[in-house]
Image: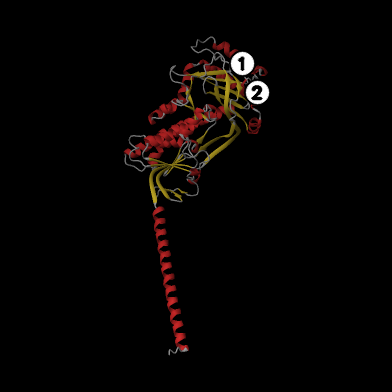
Amino acid sequence: MITITASKIITGRSFVCRAFMRSLILKIATLRGVLKMLKHCTQIRSFATHQSTFYDVVIVGGGLVGSAMACSIGTNSALGPSTRVLLLESGRLHSVKQSKEAETKHTYSNRVSAVSPSSVEMFKTFGVWDEICSKRVHPVSALYVEDGCAKSKIHFKQLDNRSPIAHIVENELIVAALQQCIRDRCANVEVRQGAVVDQNLSVPDNLSQNVTIQFEDGTIETSLMIAADGSKSTARKRAGIGFEETAYEQRAVVGTLALQHNSESDGSFAWQRFVPSGPVALLPLGRELCSLVWTVPTADAARLLQLSPEHFVEELNGTLQFDNSSSNSLVNNSLDCLGKALNFFPSKESPAKCTFPRVLSLPYDDRAAFPLSLGYAYDYIRPRVALIGDAAHRVHPLAGQGVNLGWSDVRFLTAALQRAFDEGGDLGSLTYLRDFDSASQRRNGPLIFAIDCLNRLYSTDHPFCTLFRSVGLNILDRVLPAKDLIVHLAS
């Protein structure tokens, strides 16, 4: 007979409870250990992921100028093999496939550039010009300019009857070709799309530290940051470089037009007409089509975009045929006297005589408008920073020089970096960046000033301003060396 006392029962229960609690505590301790280990591993992984990655050069902005800068370094025989470059683009870059699709559809982009001869030579050194030419490139053999407020005009033509004044190329096609060059021929260049640079950018005051950019997956460090992210450049702002900008209170209305050419034109002529509201430019896209750049007051731009295609074409033709010269007797009498005087001096150049083409239609309605302004940075450089393109300067499109100034920046900066490399110097040192700054400022300053003066001079119908510009234009049209010099400087 087994007798179980109450004390034994209590003792047994106590033992079971202690065993259960011991097991529970052990499990909790084990779980805590696992969690602690996981946390430790996460910290190790986080530390490894957020280590700094160093690049010799980081280019902020992958557009027309930024992509060209990457190609210039990547294809340079001295810099390319040993200079590690990162190209950051906040958006998505236009691909070669998209360009081919547009070409197949026979549609043109409404944003084009007049590529100067010197820019063409730069593209040839990259090995991309043949690629661009295999798509859609349209040479400009002559430029005809008229003043709608006076009987004054001028024409420019190619210097040696072989090299065009410029080539008209779609912006997205140029970027696609440059990106293809980076992929095929620039093994030292990495491209990161969707990379926004703003508060995550830190720029030092001297050479003791590198420029750093914080991203979610790690930190980027570089000896030299090149800002090519446009006139609203966040990289320039973070670097503390001042930028003076004056709005013209104008917008450029752009689009693609179908033309009815006259017998004098072979489809390679560019046309520009100055009227008080702003210049109108027609850039050739072949025999039947052209690209429009129509400068109008800001208030008129929205109205023009809302017009039906038919009414838009009607108003544009009215502007192209605008002639206010008959109402200005002072100017006309002065120009008549000037013409008679010029006839006494023999000249190889005859006065410009050409009739503007008539716009037939908008083959596909791709009209758009963008604001115009004059802008320039107080400095193009500071320790470990260089500005190129619109980040350094912005001009009116009337002379077609905006992006060409940016590409000249690319050439000057590449030369400065090559000197630093040859001498074993710091790429971000002002010792070498000053070479770029002085060369770019010397070239850009006079052109920016001249373009601004032309825009202001032709944006009025005041009799004395009209007389001044008309006399100058007619004299210049008869002096071949002066015109050749202008074409040479613009190239």
Q: Is residue 182 visible?
A: yes
Q: Nearer the viewer, residue 267 or 199?
A: 267
Residue 137 locus on image (x, y percent) = 47, 25
Q: Residues within 10 Å of mark 2 (few under 14, many from 20)?
A: some
The numbered mark at residue 314 is 2
Task: In the rendered view, tell whether residue 18 sits above or below residue 417.
Answer: below
- The residue located at (38%, 29%) in the rendering is 125
Residue 131 locus on image (x, y percent) = 42, 28
Q: Nearer the viewer, residue 243 or 156?
A: 156
Q: Residues within 10 Å of mark 1 (few under 14, many from 20)?
A: few
Mark 1 or mark 2, which has the lower sequence index? Answer: 2
Q: Amino acid at mark 2?
A: Glu
Query: SS at mark 1?
Result: helix
Furthest-front residue in view?
1
What count of labels does the image hold?
Answer: 2
The residue that mark 1 highlights is: 334
- On screen, residue 451 versus residue 25, left or right, reads right
- On screen, residue 166 versus residue 313, left or right, reads left
Query: SS at mark 2?
Result: helix
Q: Amino acid at mark 1?
A: Ser
